[in-house]
Each structure stands twice: as structure tokens, then as C-alpha cells.
């Protein structure tokens, strides 16, 4: 562990009412005392705040408030100091320079949180949840990150890992008495535990689809033939004039992406170019991009003009775009202009008969705001139905998802090993392998490369 004293700006860059600089390490308090004209910080009680001035030799840099936190009851579990100064970028730069001049060094990205992890203050999944909490852009992602910060996923698997570790100990004890041919580990009880672990791992893995939607937002591709009302719908959902609307077909030639929040969930709305064969080179690129967006979307909102006389091409396009795990909502647009009444029930029957996945059907008028709220509810319901009913812990982290998958595969190998009655040595190996993958999530088992990759994504100062 590096015992250097580190410092960094903890608040955002730019002008503000106040800024905060954090210092952490064995000499955090003594280094800060050298530049602070006020109370002797080395004699100050922990978790106290003191008024004074930051000085560079005899030059006063700023009037400040300094907070002192003594180990181990700090974020990093090291002695720490926070300097609150007037929020000028120039003042921040000056204070950091004088701290470095007196023995500190600039912190690397995520180094404060990494020290908290290495010093046992938090586990690795909690460290990652801090980055997720900082990056949260909606209520759902905030709540999930906070649950993880409180040890959600670790608590879910720690007791299972402990039970498995007990079996590993018994299996390895059998190795010490191999010549006597005795069994200390009850194989049937081990199988029951493995079933329990397998069920929990499956539940956590299945929650990733919901977690990914919460963390990154649900991608919604708005697709249809030219002049079907895609841009008008985007504007209606956003309640602002975001996209250009025109009666001229082919107005939208590139994709437009905007974030829509519905009851705490984020949706990435993607307005695309109208799908049609075209000799216009730029429009053709837009059509290609539209199809690419559908390939990566969670939801397809396909628009059909209520005044269309031939739906064969629309049906064919929907069939071409359909794929597994793509939820399709077909919207009959411009319903306010449909004087004769669109036979939506017949359309739905035809769609269901031609598509593999479930389809929702709505009659809407984006211009008159008819059934737009119902469309919002359809989008929200899609995300909600992804949520598992078994628990509050939701997997949002790709690394956790991959580690859970490896753990599940390892558990399956242990079960196979018991069934085939392989040697105790190989059974012990498979059990240790399962333990290792479970330990990767909390950081009980890790390596410097993984740690470096995780903490490099943090901001400096955190």
C-alpha cells in the first residue's frame, strides 16, 4: 500500500460559491498544518472544523474553513483533511501547488476510493457503486447505486460463499485422510447448498437486463416510413420542439437522440430517418443508420400512417426489424385525420400472426397529444416487467454480471463432479474455482490489473 499523502480537488472544475480540496495519508494533517494560519491542526480533535487562512510562506492565498478527520473513522481510513475555499479555479490551483510544495502529491483517478477499499473500509462492489452513484442521472439509478453502496450484492452472496467455504474445508480435510477413505463432507447437503447458490446466482444474473436499463437508459428506436410522424412524436414525448417537422418526406436524414424520464426511469429516444429505398446518397446513409439503431434498441416504436392504403410494406419492414428481446409497439399515427376509422383490431390480428414477439398497438395523434400518455405508460411498463420479484438487489455492473456467470458455470461443474463421483482432489479444485469467482465480486479475490481498470474510471478527487 502506498502511504504517500495525496491531494485533489473534490468539487467540480469551474467557478462556484465554494470548492473543496481533499488531503489523505499519514502526513495529511501535518502537511495541512504547514500552510494553515489558524488553530494548530495537529492538536485539533477529530471531526472538527477550523477557520483561518491558507498561506504560501507569508502570502495569504485565501480565507478558508479546514475540517480535520483522524483515522480510522474517515472515508479512506487514513488521516484526512478537507479545505473549503472560495470557489475560484485559480485559488484551487494555488492551494494544490502549495500542498505539493509541502509534501503532498496529486491523487490519481479514484485513488481516495481505492485506499478506502484497500484499507478495508468498503469492498470492491461498494467502491464501484460510488462511481455509479456519482454518475446517476435518474431516480432509479440513484436508488440502485445506493443499495449497492450499502453492501447489497455482497450481502446477497456472502453467506452462500461462507457456507461453501465450510464445505471446501471439509473436502480438503478429506485429502489429509485420503488413505483412510473417509468422508467429512455430506455430499447430499453440499448438493442442496449448490442448488441454493445456483438459484440465487440465476436470480441476480436475470436482474442485469433490468439493471442495465436503469443504469444506461432504455434505448427506444422510433421507426417508420417517411412522413409517418416520427419527429412529431419525438417532440410530443419530450414536450418540446426538438426535431424539425415538415410535410416533406425525408426531412430527418440523421438520427436524433434525447433522454426522456418517465417515473424515475430513463429512456433514450432515437428519432431516425424514414425507411424507404432512395437514390439520395445522404438519405440512404440515414436509412442505414436507422436500421443500425434498431439492432441495438430495447424497444421498437414503429409508426404507421393511419391514411396509408397499403400496409404490406410496413408489415415486411417490421418483420425484418424484429429480433429476440426486442419489444415492439406499433403506433397508428395521425388518428385525428383518419375520418373513416382505422381497423386496428384487424391490424393487430395480422401483426400477431406474422411476428414472433409480443406486440402492443396504439392509435395516437402526436399533433393533438392523443394517447401519448398511454405510450409513455407502455414504455414504463416494459422496464418494470423486467424487474425480478425475488429481491431488491439489481445487477447493473458488467463486471459483476460476468463474475456471476463464471460462478454459475463453476457451480454447475461442482454438481457434475459430485454426480460423476470424481476424485476428491478434482472436487476440491472445482469448489475453490467457484469460491474464487464469487470472491471476485466483492474484491476478496482480485488482481492489480482489475483494480487499475476499475479505479481509472473514477474522477480525480474521488
Image: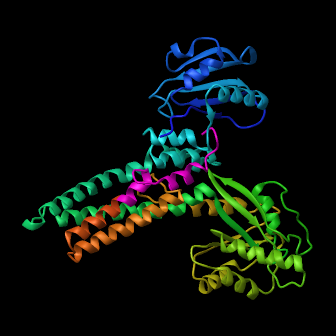
412 horizontally vs 3: left or right: left
Residue 395 locus on image (x, y percent): 49, 57
1 horizontally vs 97: left or right: left
- Is 311 placed above or below 42 here? below
Q: Which quadrant holds residue 328?
A: bottom right
Residue 264 locus on image (x, y percent): 62, 50
Q: Nearer the viewer, residue 354 or 103?
A: 103
Q: Nearer the viewer, residue 179 or 12?
A: 179
- Is 22 placed above or below 409 here? above
- How many marks do you count on the picture? 0
Q: Residue at x 39, y 64 (%)?
A: 407
Whether residue 38 appears in this view of the structure is yes
Residue 432 locus on image (x, y percent): 31, 61
Residue 93 locus on image (x, y percent): 74, 31
Is 453 inside the magenta-drawn segment? yes
**Magenta residue span:** 436-462
Q: Residue at x 66, y 84 (%)?
A: 319
Q: Nearer the viewer, residue 16 or 323?
A: 16
360 horizontally vs 164: left or right: right
Q: Which quadrant holds residue 265?
A: bottom right
- Is 292 placed above or below 278 here? above
Whether residue 181 appears in this view of the structure is no
* Residue furthest top in the image: 39
Colouring mode (rainbow / by chain / secondary structure / one colour): rainbow
Is 348 inside the magenta-drawn segment? no
- Is 42 placed above or below 453 here? above
Q: Quadrant of the C terminus?
A: top right
Amino acid at each position: 500500500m502506498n502511504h504517500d499523502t495525496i491531494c485533489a480537488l473534490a468539487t467540480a472544475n469551474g467557478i462556484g460559491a465554494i470548492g473543496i480540496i481533499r488531503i489523505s495519508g499519514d502526513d495529511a494533517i501535518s502537511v495541512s498544518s504547514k500552510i494553515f494560519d489558524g488553530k494548530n491542526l495537529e492538536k485539533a480533535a477529530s471531526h472538527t472544523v477550523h477557520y483561518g487562512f491558507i498561506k504560501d510562506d507569508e502570502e495569504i492565498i485565501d480565507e478558508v474553513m479546514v475540517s480535520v478527520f483522524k483515522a480510522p473513522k474517515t472515508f479512506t481510513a487514513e488521516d484526512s483533511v478537507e479545505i473549503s475555499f472560495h470557489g475560484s479555479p485559480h485559488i484551487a490551483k494555488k492551494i494544490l501547488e502549495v500542498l505539493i510544495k509541502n509534501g503532498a502529491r496529486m491523487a490519481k483517478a479514484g485513488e481516495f476510493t481505492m485506499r478506502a477499499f484497500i484499507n478495508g473500509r468498503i469492498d470492491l462492489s461498494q467502491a464501484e457503486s460510488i462511481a455509479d452513484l456519482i454518475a446517476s442521472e435518474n431516480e432509479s439509478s440513484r436508488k440502485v447505486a445506493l443499495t449497492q453502496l450499502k453492501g447489497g450484492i455482497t450481502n446477497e452472496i456472502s453467506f452462500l460463499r461462507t457456507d461453501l467455504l465450510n464445505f471446501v474445508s471439509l473436502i480438503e480435510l478429506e485429502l489429509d485422510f485420503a488413505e483412510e477413505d473417509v468422508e467429512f463432507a455430506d455430499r447430499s447437503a453440499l448438493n442442496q447448498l449448490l442448488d441454493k447458490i445456483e438459484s440465487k446466482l440465476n436470480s441476480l444474473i436475470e436482474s442485469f437486463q433490468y439493471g442495465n436499463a436503469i443504469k444506461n437508459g432504455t434505448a427506444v428506436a422510433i421507426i417508420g416510413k417517411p412522413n409517418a410522424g416520427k419527429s412529431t412524436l419525438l417532440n410530443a414525448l419530450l414536450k418540446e420542439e426538438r426535431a424539425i417537422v415538415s410535410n416533406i418526406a425525408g426531412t430527418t436524414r440523421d438520427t436524433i437522440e434525447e433522454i426522456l424520464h418517465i417515473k424515475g426511469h430513463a429512456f433514450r429516444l432515437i428519432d431516425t430517418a424514414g425507411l424507404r429505398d432512395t437514390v439520395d446518397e445522404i438519405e440512404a446513409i440515414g436509412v442505414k443508420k436507422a436500421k443500425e439503431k434498431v439492432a441495438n434498441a430495447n424497444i421498437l416504436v414503429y409508426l404507421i400512417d393511419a391514411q396509408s392504403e397499403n400496409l404490406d410494406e410496413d408489415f415486411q419492414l417490421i418483420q425484418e426489424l424484429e429480433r429476440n428481446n426486442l419489444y415492439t409497439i406499433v403506433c397508428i399515427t395521425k388518428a385525428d385525420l383518419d375520418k373513416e376509422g382505422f381497423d386496428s383490431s384487424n391490424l393487430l390480428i395480422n401483426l400477431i400472426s406474422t411476428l414472433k414477439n409480443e406486440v402492443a398497438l396504439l392509435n395516437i395523434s402526436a399533433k393533438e397529444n392523443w394517447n401519448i400518455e398511454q405510450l409513455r405508460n407502455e414504455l414504463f411498463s416494459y422496464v418494470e416487467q423486467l424487474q425480478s420479484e425475488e429481491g431488491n438487489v439489481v445487477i447493473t455492473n458488467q463486471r459483476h454480471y460476468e463474475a456471476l456467470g463464471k460462478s454459475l458455470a463453476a457451480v454447475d461443474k461442482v454438481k457434475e463432479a459430485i454426480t460423476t463421483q470424481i476424485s476428491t482432489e478434482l472436487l476440491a479444485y472445482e469448489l475453490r474455482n467457484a469460491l474464487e469467482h464469487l470472491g471476485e465480486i466483492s474484491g476478496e479475490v482480485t488482481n492489480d490489473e482489475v483494480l487499475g481498470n476499475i479505479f481509472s474510471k473514477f474522477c480525480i478527487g474521488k
